[in-house]
Amino acid sequence: MNKPIATAAARAAVSTGIARTARIALQAAALGALWMAVDWAVRQVGLPIPSGVIGLAVLLVLLFSGRVAPAWVKDGANWLLSDMLLFFVPAAVAAVQYGGLFREDGWRIALVMLAGTAFVMVAVAVAVDLAAKLERRLAVQRVYAERRRARA
């Protein structure tokens, strides 16, 4: 008698796993399609800004405006971020091939990397701070609006 129950549970687990995998693949494909569309637009317009930066801005606008729910991209984005290290393997191989360059200009490269990292960290900190302030302001506005509705 335990076999049908175990089989049903196994089927449910497999179908849940397949659904999750399909959702992740679909979300990652949607993020890739957004990047490709923005890349095409950037090339057509001739902007000197990388398409990944413009794509991130477009995605942020879509998320903040409510046109795209965070749940629609969350699993795909988490999967892409979890495997991000794999995208840097070719860069590490290239660094090994150009050892002479690093011996001659290594300190300059390190300085640029440190400055770039510091700039990104400061920019992220400022963006997070601004987002937190905006979130607090919107929450206060919601509370005031609810109080006004309750009084009316």
Image: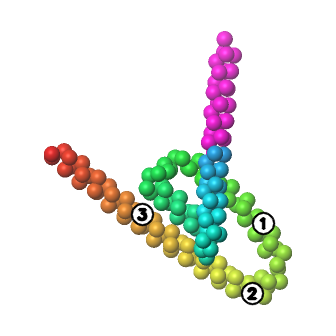
Is residue 52 visible in the rendered image? The answer is no
Q: Kindly state the secondary structure of the residue where label 1 is placed.
A: helix
Nearer-the-camera pick, 98 or 6: 98
What's the CA distance linking mark 2 and mark 3?
A: 39 Å
Which residue range is magenta in the image?
Answer: 1-24
Nearer-the-camera pick, 145 or 106: 145
Residue drawn at x 62%, y 33% is 16
Q: Which residue is mark 1?
A: 90
Tell me the crowding category of disc 3: few under 14, some 14 to 19, or many 20 or more residues within 10 angstroms, Cα based: few
Q: Position of residue 38 (x, y in %)?
A: 60, 62
Three-letter residue code for mark 3:
Ala
Residue drawn at x 59%, y 80% is 115
Nearer-the-camera pick, 147 or 85: 147
Three-letter residue code for mark 1:
Pro
What's the CA distance linking mark 1 and mark 3?
A: 34 Å
**Residue 105: assigned label:** 2
Quadrant of the image containing the C terminus: top left
Q: Kindly state the secondary structure of the residue where label 3 is placed.
A: helix
Q: Is residue 4 left or right of residue 95?
A: left
In front of the other: label 2 or label 3?
3
Mark found first going from the N terminus, 2 or 3: 2
Total tally of numbered discs in the picture = 3
Q: Kindly state the secondary structure of the residue where label 2 is placed.
A: helix
Tell me the crowding category of disc 2: few under 14, some 14 to 19, or many 20 or more residues within 10 angstroms, Cα based: few
Three-letter residue code for mark 2:
Asp
Q: Is residue 79 left or right of residue 94?
A: left
Q: Position of residue 138 (x, y in %)?
A: 33, 57
Residue drawn at x 61%, y 48% is 27
Q: Which residue is mark 3?
A: 131
